[in-house]
Image (cartoon, helix red, strand yellow):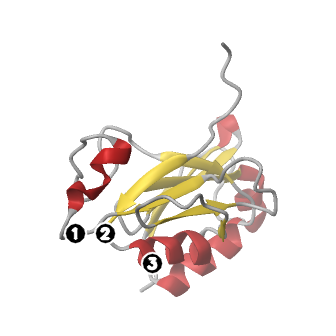
Amino acid sequence: MPISKLAHYSIRTTDLEKSCRFYEQILGFRRGYRPPFNFPGAWLYRGGDEADFGTVHIIGVDPDNPDGLAAYLGDKALPATGTGIVDHIAFLATGVEAMWQTLRAAGIEYRDRTVPSIGLHQMFIEDPSGVTIELNFPAEEVLQLGAVQPAQVATTVGTGE
């Protein structure tokens, strides 16, 4: 059974709307169809095709009753924040300069680094639940801006402040 692609990843959060706003306003996802489950949540999509069942599933957790999802998702403890044993989730992207502007305007901290040997510029951010998101841009975008010299690996930390 060969695996063809990642279907989605799910995030549990006690602030559903804040998490949805982050993925919509910062990363450009949009809400789409979600089956009528017996718990709050949202399925977020890229583009107009909903045939792939969404890329990001955000699961609302009632902070007063965190065990409410146990019947559907199993009896898992909800970590306070972060990615748990998963280090990060990565997306391919374009438009690095626009993303820098978006993050600065929203006051979101980020870490940048260019890895010329693989042609990627990596940007690391955290969603409101502390999940690390890696955005991979073509390194050429950054090199054309003169932000990084071609032979170096640069690490910069930026904030919206």
Judging from the image, what secondary structure is the residue with disc 1 in?
A: loop
Measured as percent of width and height from the top left, residue 102 is found at 60, 79
Judging from the image, what secondary structure is the residue with disc 3 in?
A: helix
For mark 1, what is the residue?
Answer: 63
Tell me the quarter of the picture where residue 115 sits: top right
Q: Quick check: 120 above or below 159?
A: above
Q: Residue at x 60, y 61 (%)?
A: 34
Query: Which labelled disc corresponds to residue 124?
Result: none
- Is residue 123 something that shows in the picture? no
Query: Which labelled disc corresponds to residue 14?
Result: 2
- Measure how far apart labels 2 and 3 are at the Cα level: 9 Å
Q: Quick check: 96 above or below 104?
A: above
| Mark earlier in primary sequence (3, 1) | 3
Q: Quadrant of the C terminus?
A: bottom left
Q: Residues within 10 Å of mark 2 (few under 14, many from 20)?
A: some
Judging from the image, what secondary structure is the residue with disc 2 in?
A: loop
| Amino acid type for the residue under numbered disc 1 | Pro
Horizontal side of 155 relative to 97 (left or right) equals: left
Measured as percent of width and height from the top left, residue 107 is found at 45, 82
